């Protein structure tokens, strides 16, 4: 049913693998749809893509027609094993058959991801009891646990152009470890009911991750989805985001509202493989082109290197949160 991925550095378009996490602790703001559709867009343009599903809900895994229980029955691993047994992601990745000509692989999630943090904590507790470990030792082990995903993903570097990580809707261990592992983060927000205060909380977490674990983590952009061109409010929200975060921090591409996302997901297809989804798919092609063009201005060996500079991000996001508040009309 599944086969191992067959990429390799000689097949890559980017000089280096770019790890991009879709992060927002708010539920239902388009993290999974964007991860899946961006992956499909990259793959359809001939880039090697690997999707990692850190969400115990496994929606992204599902969307690629991969069943975690079948994976386990076949004696293979899921992402939970990267956390619990330090299995390299390259040993977990599978290329769903007849999808994207092998350009797309998936590191499947599993519902067991929901208990990973508790299980790792329990291990620390046992060590403290049996080995008389100190609190300081425990802190060191906790740090190592947070780095496990990053270390596991290292095995994918040089094999794929992009590694895209879908995350659960909270700021717990799984989300934090994904931020520790990534080069870039994209913040998906829905035009309807989005919440800038939530973005502030996310930013604070990202600042801590940067300071303690991953100083290289950069914002690729805020992505506005579920966007209705006919609604004035949605247009205003986009303008406001660009005004507040500077145009460089908000993707010019917006993802239009379309029922095709839900339909495609129910059919376990991406919008690229679901024929009524063509229009929706074009938005993601445009997003991916925007990401790439912001980089080294094309070229086969271009490295994805979207603007803006870290300094701009800090200047803008470091602003007074009240300044950033949006009044809903
Ligand atoms: N552009 C869009 N237009 C209309 N519906 C959309 C769009 N993008 C996503 N959706 C739908 O919105 C719902 C939430 O999207 P999605 O599952 O991607 O969010 P999420 O942030 O991953 O949610 P969770 O936090 O639960 O993981 C889904 O039913 C999805 O099909
Ligand atoms: Mg999701």
Image: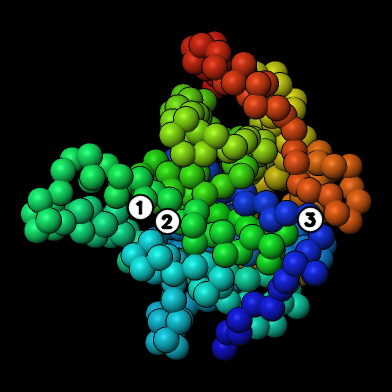
Where does label 2 land, which residue?
148
Which one is nearer the viewer's eye here, 25 or 194? 25
Relative to 7, residue 225 above or below: above
Q: Is residue 7 above or below residue 322?
A: below
Q: Nearer the viewer, residue 99 or 310?
A: 310
Q: Residue at x 36, y 50 (%)?
A: 144
| 245 relative position to 280: left or right | left
The residue wearing badge 1 is 145
Q: Is residue 195 left or right of residue 261?
A: left
Tag 3 secondary structure: loop
Do labels 2 and 1 touch, CB within 8 Å? yes
* Residue found at x 48% / y 49%: 178
Q: Sequence order check: which comes first, mark 2 or mark 3?
A: 3
* Residue drawn where x is 44% and y is 69% of the image: 87
Tell me the quarter of the image containing the C terminus: top right
Q: Is residue 161 above or below residue 230?
A: below
The numbered dot on residue 14 is: 3
Q: Is residue 217 left or right of residue 202?
A: right
In the rendered image, which quarter is residue 47 located in?
bottom right
């Amino acid at each position: 049913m599944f086969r191992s991925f067959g990429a390799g550095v000689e097949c890559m378009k980017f000089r280096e693998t770019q790890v991009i996490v879709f992060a927002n602790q708010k539920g239902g703001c388009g993290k999974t749809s964007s991860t899946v559709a961006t992956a499909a867009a990259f793959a359809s343009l001939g880039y090697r893509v690997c999707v990692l599903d850190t969400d115990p809900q496994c929606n992204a895994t599902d969307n690629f027609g991969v069943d975690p229980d079948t994976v386990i029955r076949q004696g293979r691993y899921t992402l939970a094993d990267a956390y619990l047994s330090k299995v390299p992601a390259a040993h977990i990745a599978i290329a769903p058959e007849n999808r994207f000509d092998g350009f797309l692989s998936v590191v499947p999630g599993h519902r067991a991801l929901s208990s990973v943090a508790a299980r790792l904590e329990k291990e620390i507790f046992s060590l403290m009891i049996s080995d008389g470990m100190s609190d300081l030792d425990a802190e060191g082990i906790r740090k190592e646990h947070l780095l496990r995903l990053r270390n596991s993903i290292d095995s994918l570097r040089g094999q794929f152009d992009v590694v895209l990580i879908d995350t659960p809707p909270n700021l717990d261990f799984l989300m934090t470890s994904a931020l520790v592992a990534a080069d870039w983060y994209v913040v998906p927000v829905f035009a309807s009911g989005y919440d800038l205060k939530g973005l502030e909380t996310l930013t604070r977490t990202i600042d801590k991750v940067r300071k303690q674990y991953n100083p290289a983590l950069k914002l690729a952009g805020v992505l506005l989805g579920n966007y209705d061109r006919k609604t004035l409010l949605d247009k205003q929200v986009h303008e406001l985001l660009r005004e507040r975060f500077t145009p460089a921090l908000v993707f010019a591409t917006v993802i239009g509202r379309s029922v095709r996302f839900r339909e495609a997901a129910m059919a376990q297809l991406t919008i690229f493989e679901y024929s009524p989804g063509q229009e929706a798919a074009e938005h993601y092609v445009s997003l991916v082109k925007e990401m790439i063009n912001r980089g080294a201005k094309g070229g086969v060996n271009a490295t994805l290197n979207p603007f803006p500079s870290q300094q701009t991000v800090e200047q803008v996001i470091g602003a007074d949160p009240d300044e950033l508040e949006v009044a809903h009309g």
